[in-house]
């Protein structure tokens, strides 16, 4: 399938946001980029899946991957070269997968009690093989309670959405493996704007910030309009909150006096009262009780800076899910000549012994691909070659499909960010995002809820207590008013922030980038991409704006070629060039058409 | 590398743009000329509609073309049947929508839309309302849209409470919006008409005839309900520096307009003259003022107290000589304000040299600032919450000013000390407006002094050493015989001062007075004390010559005393003065 040009500037194995951003940046400034991924979908752990896609993904993580014996590629090596083998399995980054279905398989009218049992068994996965037996038992118990729950829940007047419906409407779901939001003045948004990549996607405002407190979900007033409209706050609290928010924008002597002391103490001394203190600590700064003041203030400021740029909250969410973002950068990369290859993996890196530099890679089909730089996701690198924080940190994730919003309001199309402070001592603080169907991530009538926290135990142990309290599940009690969970998935994912930036035992032109981290924003991935780019091309601009289609001219299109135009970067001979030219041109034209189409759509 | 895309340089782009513009201009000018010539020939056809549409869609502010378009449409109305007309106008509306997208603040487009909507055989008001909502969600201060919306609401009879909900929504999304607050202030009186009659249907304009009694309780009570909702309090606690909420708040607390009436009739036997004070400045020559003396209408010449005033709250007239000069006679006087169907009687008894009949400022509660006093408890609680805010924001000028107004509404004399302290703070925190605060404070001090004078039932007005910068409410001092303005910061005795028709002694030592314009034709004035002021020329003293009884004049410490031959000049100017201090 591939006849690759002999020289690849930059080669990527697997994909994460970091890699797609860096790849786009390289491609944009004229570097030749090849991107290979062993998976059949883009974006790796950053991907979004349809419902059935997610079920397949779950299945794949249960199938014990046959550890392929490392093939002997020594025949491909030349004198003075050695091979570093790359790992094949990315299972390590995902573990403790557990799935529960709390809704009936078929529409209720047709429901027969005995089918329920079968249904739950069919959709429920019992986790990985390493999983402890005790846990499996727990899951079994679960299976038993489910049918009775389904029966009990069939009584209410509201017809519940059945599992069959979820499957049937599965294409309407875009379920992200990671759960993040875009800070409207964060580095990702800045980059999307700067590079013009934003035109490939649409975004929605997160419409409200909620918090869970005293067993209740409350709206957090964070903007001026919210404070004004809030019914929970007294007028004096309103004034105090507004005053605090305006005063903390500037750094003052008074604030510096609290450096090193907990933010909570700082807040306490402002005499704000419990209400405001809770909002400021958990929902606005989103820190814990022992976070130092300077850090708390910094994240408060970041939150406030992001407010009002696009709406009443500091956050944006991409329509069709976060998986869109890496794909947008891939598109930009492709527009400028980047080549993508899915279901294709790299087996090993050919290293020149003398210079300790990577000269080429060998793919799974025994093809040697020359490259001058190689960027790889940490999952490919054997543990003894990379430096990570020990022990490996994990994130606990839960994905729920529910039948209602946790805080119903006038509009059923709210996108909510929910902060859940630790529900008991030693429990992690949970960040929750509730997406409505207009974000194109779930079918109408349902909500897609993502929960994320730093792992203490398994995802189920960490998050199911929160789920049980805030939603109606078979285990919950007296929560008739809460939305019901129709289906849910728990899993743990390696926390990408554990990867050290430097000090890996790898050739100097091999760069490792991490998987998703637990932060709400995208700072880590963008920072990493930029730093890789700067290491390789310190002189070049990072993601300069892509031109508008109407401003693009091609060589030969215009005889009065520009005097002040770009200097051609590099002279390259070879017959393949001619073909490439044609290809690129076609691609650009296609792109142009596509953009025009888009324009028409938006104009309408 | 070959085959790389090249980005057009800016020069190239500029050149292309220039060419594009040239081309556009050519088309535009050609179309415009075609339109003008068609209009000249009086052609009202579809082609003309299309031409104007083409031009207006690129430049919606071309009023002549809109006019031409209306001519065409009116012509079409006469030749087509209703369904066709409906279609044409609907097309017009959607064309207008595209114009508004180009320029959402185009006068021409909005006006034309109003015109079309009014002529549409079967208007779809709901659609128009939603268009307005869309426009306002893009720019909630687009006054063109507000205007158009008001028209739509009026035409389609949207219930007032629904409109109130609409303002709630807009204020909820951004409360720094005068338009929404103001709209509320026009809606509330509609929802709660002032008249004590049973509430009329909301659509009717309630002010078709002014209600007979001004401060009707039902209206006030309803307003108080809106205070309880505390929407406006939310706004100023959230952002006390936002003016729009404060203005609305003052309106909400504000009192109804004063009743129009004759507040005082004064008659003097010696001078055989009548002075009449009104509740507002009027032009007596044109309001149908009728003087009836002992049942006989009199032909009199009304004049304002100073030639500078065409409108004045005080008017005087001389009675025909001899009509009331006999001290043994009793007379009954009535002044009719025919225009307002109101009048006031005054009896001059035997043996009296003067008489009056009036409503005192105290009775009328004239000086409870502009705020209502109907429900003291409401104001009291408002004052409390403002004080609460002031504790949090001690230097917020809007809060301080509102507190002062509330205090004045509640108990002007009782809160005098606090009021003065707050004024001091205001002058410091808002030094740009310190003169305004000085004047306002002067006004309040004068009001307090008038109240004190009335309680004491005297005709002496003494307000020395109070940092007065200006004089006001002089119409309330019509009956004052002694005035003491010493040791203030007054710079003039303005023309209004001539309203003090009974004044005998004027004390104004230690001010900065340079101008005596208002000491004019004061029939009883005998003594003028102006020690240490800034009167510098003889011409400044000219007005005094019009006061026939002036005997004593103290001008010590004024620059004018340095003038050569001052004594003889003054003797010539003011022959009646016998006691002159220089």
Image: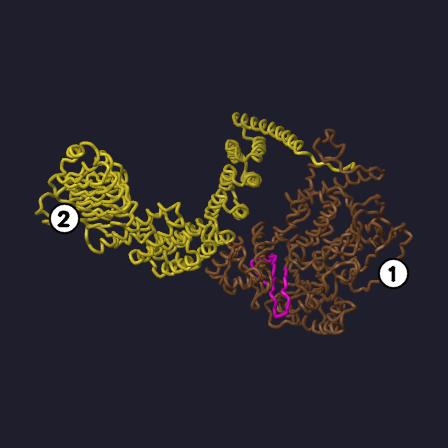
Chain colours: A brown, B yellow
Q: Furthest-front residue in view? A: A354
Query: Quarter of the image containing the N terminus of chain B?
Result: top right
Q: Which residues are magenta?
A: A405-433
Under tag 1, what secondary structure?
loop
For residue B183, side relative to residue B371 (left or right) = right
Q: Furthest-right residue in view? A: A75
Is B183 drawn above or below residue A380 in the view shown? above
Q: Which of the 4 image quadrants contains residue B568?
A: top left
> Which residue is tagged 2?
B348
> Which residue is tagged 1?
A69
Q: Let me know if marks 2 and 1 both belong to one chain.
A: no
Q: Is residue B311 magenta?
A: no
The mark lying in front, picked from 2 and 1, is 1
For residue B528, side relative to residue B87 (left or right) = left
Residue B477 in percent (x, y) is at 23, 47
Q: Is residue B343 visible?
A: no
Q: Is residue B314 visible?
A: yes
């Amino acid at each position: 399938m591939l006849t690759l040009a002999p020289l690849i500037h930059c080669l990527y194995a697997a994909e994460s946001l970091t890699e797609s951003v860096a790849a786009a940046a390289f491609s944009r400034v004229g570097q030749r980029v090849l991107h290979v991924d062993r998976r059949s979908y883009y974006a790796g752990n950053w991907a979004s899946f349809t419902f059935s896609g997610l079920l397949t993904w779950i299945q794949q993580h249960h199938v014990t991957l046959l550890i392929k014996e490392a093939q002997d590629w020594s025949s491909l090596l030349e004198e003075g070269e050695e091979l570093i083998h790359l790992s094949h399995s990315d299972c390590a980054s995902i573990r403790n997968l557990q799935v529960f279905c709390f809704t009936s398989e078929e529409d209720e009218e047709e429901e027969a009690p005995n089918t329920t049992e079968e249904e739950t068994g069919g959709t429920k996965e019992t986790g990985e093989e390493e999983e402890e037996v005790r846990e499996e038992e727990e899951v079994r118990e679960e299976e038993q309670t489910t049918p009775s729950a389904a029966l009990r829940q069939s009584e209410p007047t509201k017809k519940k959405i059945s599992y069959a419906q979820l499957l049937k409407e599965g294409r309407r779901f875009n379920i992200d493996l990671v759960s993040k939001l875009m800070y409207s003045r964060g580095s990702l948004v800045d980059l999307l704007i700067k590079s013009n990549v934003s035109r490939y996607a649409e975004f929605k405002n997160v419409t409200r910030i909620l918090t869970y407190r005293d067993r209740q979900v409350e709206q957090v007033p964070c903007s001026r309009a919210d404070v004004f409209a809030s019914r929970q706050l007294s007028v004096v609290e309103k004034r105090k909150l507004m005053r605090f928010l305006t005063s903390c924008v500037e750094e003052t002597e008074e604030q510096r006096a609290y450096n090193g002391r907990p933010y909570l103490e700082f807040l306490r001394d402002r005499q704000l009262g419990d209400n405001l203190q809770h909002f400021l600590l958990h929902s606005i700064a989103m820190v814990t009780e022992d976070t130092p003041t300077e850090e708390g203030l910094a994240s408060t400021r970041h939150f406030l800076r992001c407010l009002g740029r696009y709406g009443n909250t500091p956050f944006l969410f991409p329509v069709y899910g976060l998986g869109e973002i890496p794909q947008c950068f891939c598109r930009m990369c492709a527009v400028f000549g980047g080549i993508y290859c899915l279901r294709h993996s790299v087996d090993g890196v050919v290293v020149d012994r003398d210079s300790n530099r990577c000269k080429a890679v060998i793919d799974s089909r025994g093809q040697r691909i020359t490259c001058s730089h190689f960027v790889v996701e940490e999952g490919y690198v054997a543990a003894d070659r990379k430096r990570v924080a020990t022990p490996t940190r994990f994130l606990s994730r839960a994905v729920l499909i529910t039948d209602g919003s946790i805080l119903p309001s006038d509009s059923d199309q709210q996108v909510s960010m929910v902060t859940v402070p630790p529900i008991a001592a030693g429990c992690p603080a949970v960040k929750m995002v509730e997406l409505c169907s207009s974000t194109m991530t779930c079918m109408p009538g349902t909500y897609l809820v993502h929960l994320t926290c730093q792992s203490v135990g398994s995802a189920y142990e960490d998050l199911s207590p929160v789920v049980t309290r805030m939603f109606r599940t078979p285990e919950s009690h007296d929560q008739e008013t809460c939305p019901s969970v129709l289906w849910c998935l728990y899993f743990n994912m390696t926390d990408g922030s554990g990867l050290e930036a430097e000090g890996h035992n790898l050739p100097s032109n091999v760069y490792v980038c991490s998987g998703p981290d637990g932060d709400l924003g995208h700072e880590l991935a963008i920072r990493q991409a930029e730093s890789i780019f700067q290491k390789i091309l310190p002189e070049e601009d990072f993601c300069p704006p892509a031109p508008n289609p109407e401003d693009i001219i091609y060589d030969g299109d215009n005889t009065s070629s520009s005097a002040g135009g770009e200097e051609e970067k590099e002279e390259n001979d070879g017959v393949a060039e001619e073909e490439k030219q044609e290809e690129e041109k076609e691609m650009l034209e296609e792109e142009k058409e596509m953009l025009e189409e888009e324009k028409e759509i938006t104009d309408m | 590398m070959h085959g790389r895309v090249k980005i057009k340089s800016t020069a190239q782009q500029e050149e292309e743009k220039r060419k594009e513009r040239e081309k556009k201009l050519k088309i535009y000018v050609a179309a415009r000329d075609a339109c003008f010539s068609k209009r000249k020939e009086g052609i009202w056809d579809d082609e003309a509609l299309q031409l104007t549409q083409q031009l207006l869609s690129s430049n919606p502010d071309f009023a002549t073309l809109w006019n031409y378009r209306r001519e065409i449409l009116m012509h079409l109305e006469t030749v087509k049947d209703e369904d066709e007309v409906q279609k044409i106008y609907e097309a017009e509306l959607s064309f207008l929508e595209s114009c508004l997208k180009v320029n959402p603040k185009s006068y021409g487009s909005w006006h034309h839309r109003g015109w079309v909507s009014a002529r549409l055989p079967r208007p779809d008001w709901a659609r128009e309302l939603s268009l307005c909502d869309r426009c306002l969600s893009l720019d909630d201060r687009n006054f063109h849209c507000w205007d158009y919306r008001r028209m739509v609401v009026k035409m389609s009879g949207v219930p007032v409470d629904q409109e109130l909900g609409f303002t709630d929504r807009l204020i909820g999304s951004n409360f720094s919006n005068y338009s929404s607050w103001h709209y509320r202030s026009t809606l509330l009186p509609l929802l709660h008409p002032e008249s004590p009659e049973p509430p009329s249907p909301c659509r009717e304009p309630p002010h078709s005839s002014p209600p007979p009694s001004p401060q009707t309780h039902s209206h006030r009570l309803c307003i108080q309900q809106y205070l309880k909702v505390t929407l406006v309090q939310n706004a100023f606690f959230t952002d006390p520096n936002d003016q729009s909420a404060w203005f609305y708040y003052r309106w909400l607390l504000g009192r109804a307009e004063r009743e129009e009436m004759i507040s005082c009739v004064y008659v003097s036997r010696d001078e055989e003259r009548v002075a009449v004070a009104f509740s507002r400045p009027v032009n007596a020559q044109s309001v149908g003022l009728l003087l009836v003396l002992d049942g006989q209408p009199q032909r009199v010449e009304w004049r304002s107290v100073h030639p500078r005033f065409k409108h004045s709250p005080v008017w005087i007239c001389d009675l025909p000589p001899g009509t009331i000069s006999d001290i043994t006679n009793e007379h009954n006087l009535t002044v009719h304000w025919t225009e307002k169907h109101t009048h006031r009687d005054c009896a001059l008894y035997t043996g009296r040299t003067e008489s009056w009949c009036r409503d005192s400022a105290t009775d009328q509660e004239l000086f409870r600032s502009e705020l209502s006093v109907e429900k003291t408890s409401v104001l009291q609680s408002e004052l409390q919450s403002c004080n609460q805010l002031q504790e949090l924001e001690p230097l917020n000028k809007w809060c301080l000013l509102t507190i002062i107004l509330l205090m004045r509404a509640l108990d002007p004399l009782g809160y005098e000390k606090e009021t003065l302290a707050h004024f001091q703070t205001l002058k410091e925190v808002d030094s740009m407006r310190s003169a305004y605060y000085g004047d306002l404070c002067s006004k309040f001090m004068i009001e307090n002094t008038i109240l004190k004078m009335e309680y004491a039932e005297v005709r002496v007005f003494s307000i020395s050493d109070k940092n007065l910068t200006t004089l006001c409410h002089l119409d309330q001092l019509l009956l004052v015989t002694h005035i003491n303005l010493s040791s203030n910061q007054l710079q003039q005795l303005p023309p209004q001062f001539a309203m003090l028709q009974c004044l005998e002694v004027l004390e104004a030592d230690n001010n900065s007075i340079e101008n005596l314009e208002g000491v004019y034709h004061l029939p009883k004035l005998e003594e003028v004390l102006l020690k240490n002021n800034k009167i510098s020329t003889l011409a400044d003293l000219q007005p005094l010559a019009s006061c026939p009884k002036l005997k004593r004049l103290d001008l010590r410490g004024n620059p004018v005393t340095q003038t050569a031959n001052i004594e003889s000049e003054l003797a010539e100017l003011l022959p009646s003065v016998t006691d002159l201090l220089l």
